[in-house]
Image (cartoon, coloured by chain):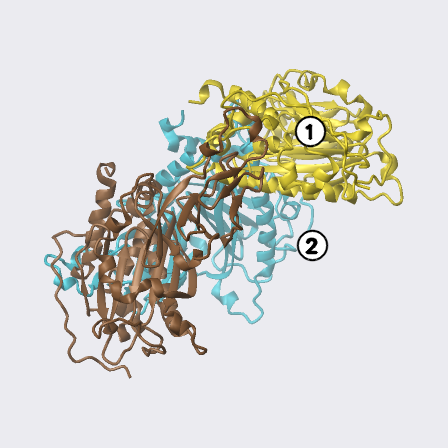
Chain colours: A brown, B yellow, C cyan
Amino acid sequence: MLQMETDLVVKPRDVMPQGASTLPAAFYTDETYFQREMERLYARMWVCVGRTEQVEKPGRFIVRELLGESIIVTSNAAGKVNAFYNVCRHRGTKLCTEREGSFSGSIQCPYHAWTYDLDGRLIGAPHMEEVPHFAKGDFPLNRVHADLWDGHIFINLSPDPSPLRQQLAGLPEKFVPWNMQDLRLGHRIVYDVKANWKLIIQNYNECLHCPNLHPALNQLSHYLSGENEPLQATYMGGRMDLRPGVETLSMDGRCSRGFLPGLSEQDVRRVYYYAIFPNMLLSLHPDYMLVHTLWPQSAGRTINVCEWHFHPKELAELEFDPMDAVSFWDMTNRQDWHVCELSQEGIKSRAYRPGPYSNREDLLYAFDRMIVGVHGADVR
Amino acid sequence: MLQMETDLVVKPRDVMPQGASTLPAAFYTDETYFQREMERLYARMWVCVGRTEQVEKPGRFIVRELLGESIIVTSNAAGKVNAFYNVCRHRGTKLCTEREGSFSGSIQCPYHAWTYDLDGRLIGAPHMEEVPHFAKGDFPLNRVHADLWDGHIFINLSPDPSPLRQQLAGLPEKFVPWNMQDLRLGHRIVYDVKANWKLIIQNYNECLHCPNLHPALNQLSHYLSGENEPLQATYMGGRMDLRPGVETLSMDGRCSRGFLPGLSEQDVRRVYYYAIFPNMLLSLHPDYMLVHTLWPQSAGRTINVCEWHFHPKELAELEFDPMDAVSFWDMTNRQDWHVCELSQEGIKSRAYRPGPYSNREDLLYAFDRMIVGVHGADVR
Amino acid sequence: MLQMETDLVVKPRDVMPQGASTLPAAFYTDETYFQREMERLYARMWVCVGRTEQVEKPGRFIVRELLGESIIVTSNAAGKVNAFYNVCRHRGTKLCTEREGSFSGSIQCPYHAWTYDLDGRLIGAPHMEEVPHFAKGDFPLNRVHADLWDGHIFINLSPDPSPLRQQLAGLPEKFVPWNMQDLRLGHRIVYDVKANWKLIIQNYNECLHCPNLHPALNQLSHYLSGENEPLQATYMGGRMDLRPGVETLSMDGRCSRGFLPGLSEQDVRRVYYYAIFPNMLLSLHPDYMLVHTLWPQSAGRTINVCEWHFHPKELAELEFDPMDAVSFWDMTNRQDWHVCELSQEGIKSRAYRPGPYSNREDLLYAFDRMIVGVHGADVR
């Protein structure tokens, strides 16, 4: 089935500015840099935390750890998605210890039974009525902004964030045909990667490493195929083409299920790879959606949650089996995280100096410039 | 057996000062605050480290870890209890690696065999006689002050401490009837609690959380019963009443052994709870003494040693079984440590703000004021 | 076989200067002191990293971790030993993850396939030819200086080190008779010692502790026998004598193999112990060479690699068995590391004060003075 293409069109890349090279080590190893990126990117931008299917029944919740904060994401009786800090307003007790579950109409603190409704209003506080001037209205749960895009839930720790739409810019229109809100989870793998979060994004945004590191991937999709969009303020990405005869990215290149409805003939021959800053990697295949979300833990460690989403019609099939796609990407993921970890280790060395980028690493260079801007004058 | 009381007398509590609320997060999470409390409270006050029964034979010893220091507590031939830093005066070698045991008349360093008697005097130092001016008398073990109260051993790391009696104030007279020095260990459980030591003391000093967290305890002793003493400089506490028909705090409320001799009719209907700063929680039941000692490890971690002590006459009984009391408090302890750990986690959040105290948390508010005084001008 | 000697000649030691005592705690516990010693001793001096037999075939390599750096040691086609930082010049990726192995003629980065020859020259860099001004000659592997002494490999992290010969001073001439380059590894044990590296060197350079800690060793070689050389700038050591009837240091004092060829009658009655700063302990026995190399990890932790080397003629014997020597020193090593760890623990105490040295600890006092000089004015 795999045929060598005879007509690969390689679009030439722009030549790098002279001296274009990787970032100094501190960007990857210094906890001060890490904290700055957390505060200026992760605490100010919209962060992808999950899918609406996870909270679609009232009171269903998920708990997420972000920047050391525990955040409850749930929905009220009207289906509105709310997010709250997981902290009681009485004595600061963590309210909820499960990673996911259902509230039966209210959220109760296990310590002194302070009770909140699903919109965060304090509705019970035993014996506080004996305290003059105490008013329940003064002690709602601390709210975190939450918003949705096509089935993806985003939260924003900023007290006054700009709209999610602004961060997503042209992406919602671009990806309308995939109808992402219809898709449902088929498989999830959580990776613990001993590398800086930016190394994972950089790894995701070039395929120069594919012939050497991912021979299987390179057999299905030529590393010089496709085209990148120029870097945007809040995302970057591009597409790669499937080789002739290849139907999707799977262990054997065959597609064991139908393509997503609504895709054009062109789109079913491509895989789209978009890094949506700061934490989402969205990879749209002809027949499934792959979503990585990054959860930075320290300068040198990132939890990486990888999910495979499919069309519910396919999920409902008796013989549905996601493993062709899961195995392919699990293998490829592990190859990637391995070199990210090797880079993290090498960059720590006193011998490390920024190295030269090739023209094939154009998005990385642009991303680095953005990151340098985030640090601004704080970089000596 | 359990009857609902018909005549519970609830003594009203004073109304909290307006705005009375919990402490800022730094008091629980900041290692600088923790170190300050260690130096100003734990290194200056008398700390409960064990029971005289543990060292009652000459040369018997226990080793305790306090503020990162290893301390040997032992007794000499005359029965005097001594405490020493576990450090050889030659090259600083730790002398004793066991947690408890017996010295055969002297303490010998395993490295070069420097040897000390049970009062800490250097009595052997091979080849040091070749060194002019060397005098054994100049190199005794470094002594730690030690003193006793009714069977409890206390040490004080201060070079010149005020007397233990002063710290205990009115407690020795108050608890004469319990004859604590007669009691003997029946059971010990060591808990590793991921919470600040003050959260454990605060948890101990209010029962507002009992109906929600400890339904079994609340069945035996109503959470609104009893009365607190006003906070003292060095301790705080109060009593709670057993419900009618309840004999002691045990799994079924029955007492499977005799009451402690010497207790009044009133005292056998009560449980006394006293937090003796900085590290002892003394809970006197009609038939047993429960002692918690706290061993702070960091801002967010405390080793908590819980011991059940009984009258030797009961311990000598063939059918003696402490498990009715042990199981009850082990269950209750675990409930308490769990919410202490949840508080520790929640207080770390950027969303945490001091929350309002109810009138039922009066001792906590007073304790907090004492703690604020300890930090003094060092709190910005 | 073991006889009590009748004619032990104990050479008197010089009397210590008045007040000669151990170093303040910070030298053993403070990470700032540790880092200073790493930068001024370990990063400037020649450090023993292994044996030429480990890289004697071209492309054979070992990887060593020193000061947080990963260093590749290998040999080129001409047999020259090279050392390189284990860091790709492209994006900083660690090149080599094995601890030892063979390169097949070149060193290739697993990420983007940059390739170096065995002298560190960049010979392949895919797609970099598209980048103007890029020249492979500008990006060789970062070299680490390497040199040899009688079969031992040393590296030096300094960019411009003084010669290894200068550091070794009179040792090469002194130890010519042992023909160390001929010896081959018979056994290796790696110890993880929770003690400062200097405590291990100090432990190695006095035998005052032997009667108490090593009764078996003291039975074979009297702790007061032998003689020390005065401390040199870069090493210190001395010899001890075997007791009459004892053939070597082994479990029973017998030697189950021939003495090393070339040793004098005098040398086969002695064991030489030399600490070659900063990380090599060389112990020459009549029939084997014991080498410890120290790998400091932090102020309180040192990896200690212990190797037993024998004459190849003996290793080739069908009945060759190193375990008489291995067991003896493994037992003795473990006794030593135990007291080193106890010293590390005790020295941390607030009660620790420098203690008095005996005349038998003369090398330690001299070593301490050298260490104080290394810290210079940085010690307050």
- Please state the chain letter of the residue tagged with numbered disc 1 in the rendered image: B
Identify the mark at residue C1; answer none if there is no mark.
2
Residue C149 seen from this side: no
Query: As drawn, which residue projects farthest toward the bottom?
Result: A1
The quadrant holding residue A231 is: bottom left
- State the image coordinates of residue C4 (x, y, percent, origin top left): 69, 46
Front residue of C135 and C27: C135
Whether residue A342 is situated above or below residue A5 in the rendered picture? above
Q: Please tell me if label 1 and label 2 are on a single chain.
A: no
Q: CA distance from mark 1 to mark 2?
A: 37 Å
- State the image coordinates of residue C233 (x, y, percent, origin top left): 39, 37
In the image, what residue occupies the spot 61% across and 35% down? B94
Residue A102 seen from this side: yes
Q: Please state, as top left, top right, bottom left or bottom right, where the N terminus of chain A lies in the image.
A: bottom left
Question: Is B350 left or right of A201, judged from the image as shown?
Answer: right
Q: Residues within 10 Å of mark 2 (few under 14, many from 20)?
A: few
Secondary structure type for disc 1: strand
Question: Is C366 left or right of A263, judged from the image as shown?
Answer: right
- Please state the chain letter of the residue tagged with numbered disc 2 in the rendered image: C
- The residue tagged 1 is B116
What amino acid is labelled 2 in the image?
A: Met
